[in-house]
Every structure is written in C-alpha cells, then in structure tokens.
Image (cartoon, helix red, strand yellow):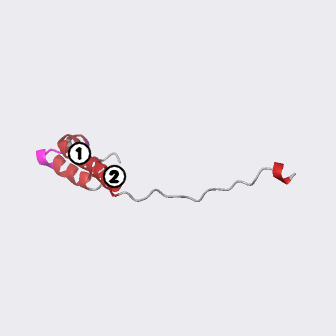
Amino acid sequence: MLSEQAKPFQAKPFQARPFSVKRAALAATVGNMLEFYDFITYSFFAIQIGHTFFPSGRSGGSCSASIPTGSAGGPPCC
C-alpha cells in the first residue's frame, strides 16, 4: 500500500544564475542611456516648461526657475 501513495513534494534548492560581467555591463549601459535620455529631454524642453509652469515678467526668470526643478530629481509632474 505504501508504494501506491504519492511521495511528498521535494523542492529543488534555489540556484541563482551565475554572475555575468556582460549582463551587468549591459544593464548599466541601458540604465545610463535612459538616464541620459531623461536629462537631455528635460534640458531641451526646460524653456517651454519654464514658461508654462513658472510664468514670469522677465524672460530669464521662468527658465531660471525650471532648471533647479529638473536638477531636483525629475520633471515637475513627479
């Protein structure tokens, strides 16, 4: 009768993937590319963002207010 009963589930031990320098370099490159894209896009639109979100009578006032906003960690919507 014992041979007909199901055996208890035996989980296999977790095996992590071996460390890959190529994979780590690719991940770092992709992350840096996305961060650079974010920085360049915000820098390109800083003047338009300044005029929209920080209206000012002076021409440089709104742009001067938008640049620290971008350096604080992201666009004003976040």
| 25 inside magenta stretch | no
Kindly identify which numbered label has been placed on residue 28: none
Q: Which residues are magenta?
A: 53-61
Q: Identify whether 39 is placed above or below 16.
A: above
Residue occupying the point 35% across, 48% down: 78
Q: Which element carries disc 1, helix, strand or loop?
A: helix
Mark 2 crowd level (few <14, some 14–19, many ≥20, 10 Å Cα)? few
Q: Quadrant of residue 41?
A: top left
> Is 29 positioned to the left or the right of 46 in the image?
right
Q: Quadrant of residue 56?
A: top left
| Depth check, front residue: 15 or 47 | 15
Q: Which residue is mark 1?
A: 42
Query: Label 1 to label 2, Cα distance in Å?
Result: 23 Å
| Depth check, front residue: 69 or 41 | 41
Q: Which element carries disc 2, helix, strand or loop?
A: helix
Q: Which residue is mark 2?
A: 27
Does residue 55 appear anywhere in the picture? Answer: no
Toward the left, the furthest residue is 59
Does residue 45 appear anywhere in the picture? Answer: yes
Q: Quadrant of residue 10?
A: bottom right
Residue 32 spot, x, y in % from top left? 27, 52
Residue occupying the point 84% across, 54% down: 2
Residue 53 spot, x, y in % from top left? 26, 43
Q: Amino acid at mark 1?
A: Tyr
Residue 55 spot, x, y in % from top left? 21, 43
Toward the front, the furthest residue is 3
